[in-house]
Image (cartoon, helix red, strand yellow):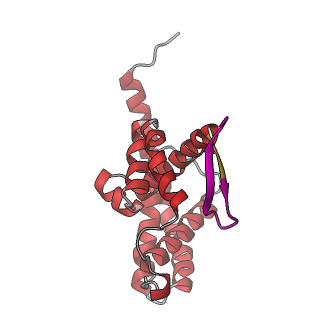
Amino acid sequence: MAETTMSDTSQKQSDGRRTASRELAVAYPRFREGLLAFLRSKLSEPAVAEDLLHEVFLKALDALDRGARPGNLPAWLRTIAANALADHYRRSRPTEALPVDLADDGPDHNQAEQEMAICLIPFINGLPPKYRKVMYATILEGKSGAQLSREMDLTPSAIKSRMARGRAMLREAILDCCHIEASASGEILEYRRRGS
């Protein structure tokens, strides 16, 4: 039986990348106009449509390099185009200041919530390090996901993922330890240790 060496694996990956690049090079002239027409129909600026088309093919090439093998290339490219369009609108969406009546008036004065926040520290300290840092920063320091993304040099989706997993671990640990009563809106009304 032949052994696969590291150089054999590297060679196969390199061959796969070249094949992916060739596939996309052949697909580009075939699908360029259709994708561009789709993007132009959704955008008011033709130059932005061209930029997004460029982004679509770069994302496709990157995905192919990482091993993606779409069964239906035109549908796959259109999906990438639709996602790029959604990303474009998300990035360009204007932000508005909150109305004065919705602005944060400072810390919530609910006694149970304040006490619960202090009680979270041991639970947060019990999390694995990558989740501990994110949960400590967001819950106790009030940092945003975007701010953490910049500070930790991680993508926003990586931070969101860590926040979601960290919250799930915290919730499980807290519910194992405490009984919590909350209002319909989620405000903590009362809590107590289980067994007391």
Q: Residue at x 65, y 51 (%)?
A: 71
Q: Nearer the viewer, residue 144 or 155?
A: 144
Q: Residue at x 54, y 57 (%)?
A: 112
Q: Nearer the viewer, residue 143 or 82?
A: 143
Q: Position of residue 170 (x, y in %)?
A: 54, 44
Look at the image and say whether residue 120 sits in the magenta stretch. no
Indicate the quadrant containing the C terminus: top left, top right, bottom left or bottom right. Answer: top right
Looking at the image, is 185 positioned above or below residue 166?
Answer: below
Q: Which residue is drawn at 48% across and 40% down?
A: 123
Q: What stretch is highlighted in magenta?
A: 181-196
Looking at the image, is 191 positioned above or below residue 125?
Answer: below
Q: Position of residue 47 (x, y in %)?
A: 39, 83
Looking at the image, is 126 positioned above or below residue 67?
Answer: above
Q: Which of 114 and 86 is in front in this view?
A: 114
Q: Which residue lies furthest to the top in this view?
A: 1
Look at the image and say whether residue 191 sits in the magenta stretch. yes
Q: Can residue 183 be seen here?
A: yes
Q: Residue furthest bottom?
A: 44
Across the whole image, how many numbered discs are drawn on residues?
Answer: 0
Q: Position of residue 42 (x, y in %)?
A: 55, 83
Q: In the rendered image, which quarter is residue 105 located in?
A: bottom left
Q: Nearer the viewer, residue 127 or 11?
A: 127
Q: Residue at x 37, y 53 (%)?
A: 137
Q: Can residue 99 be seen here?
A: no
Q: Where is residue 51 in the image (x, y as percent from the top left)?
A: 39, 75
Looking at the image, is 183 positioned above or below residue 103?
Answer: above
Q: In the rendered image, which quarter is residue 131 located in?
A: top left
